[in-house]
Every structure is written in structure tokens, then in C-alpha cells.
């Protein structure tokens, strides 16, 4: 797996995940840009994702759901804040109802993805998540966010190797 480190700073309300891949920045960017590729890794292996809508432009929205082993389908949404292909993506992420509408009683977070070329080839991907409060961070971590993100990113190497 290409996961290098996970740094949680509860006082700052942040979690930063660093991963490296043996593929150029443009290829790793397509994992975010192409909804069919995104759904092959965004959910952990036991909760594969299905992308319903995908508008990766500032102000655009992404609606997806994950299907669990018992058939449950939690939905999620993104509101795209900024896009600078192929280096940077910033979006607000949260839980949704079946129509993709945000669930107001669930916490949201802001995620900034930065892709940079590594010396000697490959890509470093830094995914920095900012939570609105310590309570929101603790709640989402208790729900398995860190483990889910690590498992999801663990699928990227195979996807990149497959072309």
C-alpha cells in the first residue's frame, strides 16, 4: 500500500493523509476527475461507491452512495470549492439523503487534495481534512473514517497498475 502517514491533530481539528503512487500526477488526477474511476476506490472494499452525479467545477456537486455488505446504502455529497487540475481539489464533504441532499444533523468537513510530482517519478497525494469542531472530528473518527480512508486509498495502486 502507498499510504505513507496519517496525522491527526485533534486540537486543530485536522487529519492529513499522505500517500505516494508510481504514476504521473495527470494519471492520479484522473482518479478524482473520472467518476467511473473514482467509484472504483472512493469507498473501502467492503463499501464500494457508486457515483450518481459528478460535476468537478467550482460550485459543482458530487452525489454518491456506498453499498455495504448487508445492502445498506449510505449516501454522501461534495460541494466543490476549488479545482486546479491536475494539482489541487478542494471540496466540502458530508452525508446525504437518497436524493443527495445534505443531512443537516450530520457533520461536514472540508477536504483539500494536493498532487505533486515526486523527485524521480510518481506522485505524492496529500489529503487534508478540516473538521468544523473537535466533536465532529471525534464522531467521524469513531465511525471509522480513518480506517475507511486508508482502506479506500489502498485500492489505488491496483487501479493504477490496471491502466
Image: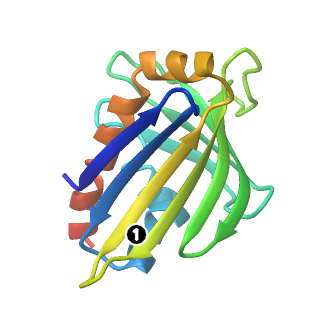
Of residues 62 and 108, the one drawn nearer to the viewer in this rendering = 108
Query: Height in image: 92 above or below 140?
Result: below
Which quadrant of the view contains residue 103? top right
Residue 35, percent from left and from top: 52, 58
**In the image as oriented, which residue stretches furthest toward the right?**
59
Residue 41, percent from left and from top: 37, 49
Camera sees residue 162: no
Which quadrant of the view contains residue 48? top left
Query: Height in image: 99 above or below 40?
Result: above
Residue 101, percent from left and from top: 76, 30
Residue 31, percent from left and from top: 44, 63
Is 10 placed left or right of 19 in the picture? right
Q: Residue at x 44, y 57 (%)?
A: 126
Element carrying mark 1? helix
Is 91 placed left or right of 37 in the picture? right
Of residues 152 and 126, the one drawn nearer to the viewer in this rendering = 126
**In the image as oriented, which residue stretches furthest toward the front?**
11
Which quadrant of the view contains residue 147? top left
Total marks placed: 1
Camera sees residue 23: yes
Determine which residue is flagged by label 1. Answer: 28
Amino acid at each position: 500500500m502507498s499510504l505513507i502517514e496519517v496525522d491527526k491533530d485533534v486540537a486543530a481539528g485536522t487529519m492529513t493523509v499522505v500517500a505516494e503512487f508510481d504514476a504521473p500526477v495527470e494519471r492520479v488526477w484522473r482518479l478524482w476527475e473520472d467518476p467511473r474511476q473514482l467509484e472504483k476506490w472512493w469507498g473501502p472494499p467492503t463499501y464500494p461507491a457508486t457515483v450518481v452525479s459528478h460535476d468537478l467545477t467550482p460550485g459543482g456537486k458530487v452525489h454518491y452512495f456506498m453499498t455495504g455488505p448487508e445492502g445498506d446504502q449510505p449516501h454522501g455529497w461534495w460541494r466543490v470549492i476549488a479545482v486546479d487540475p491536475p494539482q489541487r481539489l478542494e471540496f466540502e464533504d458530508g452525508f446525504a439523503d437518497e436524493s443527495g441532499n445534505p443531512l443537516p444533523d450530520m457533520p461536514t468537513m472540508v477536504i483539500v487534495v494536493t498532487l505533486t510530482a515526486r523527485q524521480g517519478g510518481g506522485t505524492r497525494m496529500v489529503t487534508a481534512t478540516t473538521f468544523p469542531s473537535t466533536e465532529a472530528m471525534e464522531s467521524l473518527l469513531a465511525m471509522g473514517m480513518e480506517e475507511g480512508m486508508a482502506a479506500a486509498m489502498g485500492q489505488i495502486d491496483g487501479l493504477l497498475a490496471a491502466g
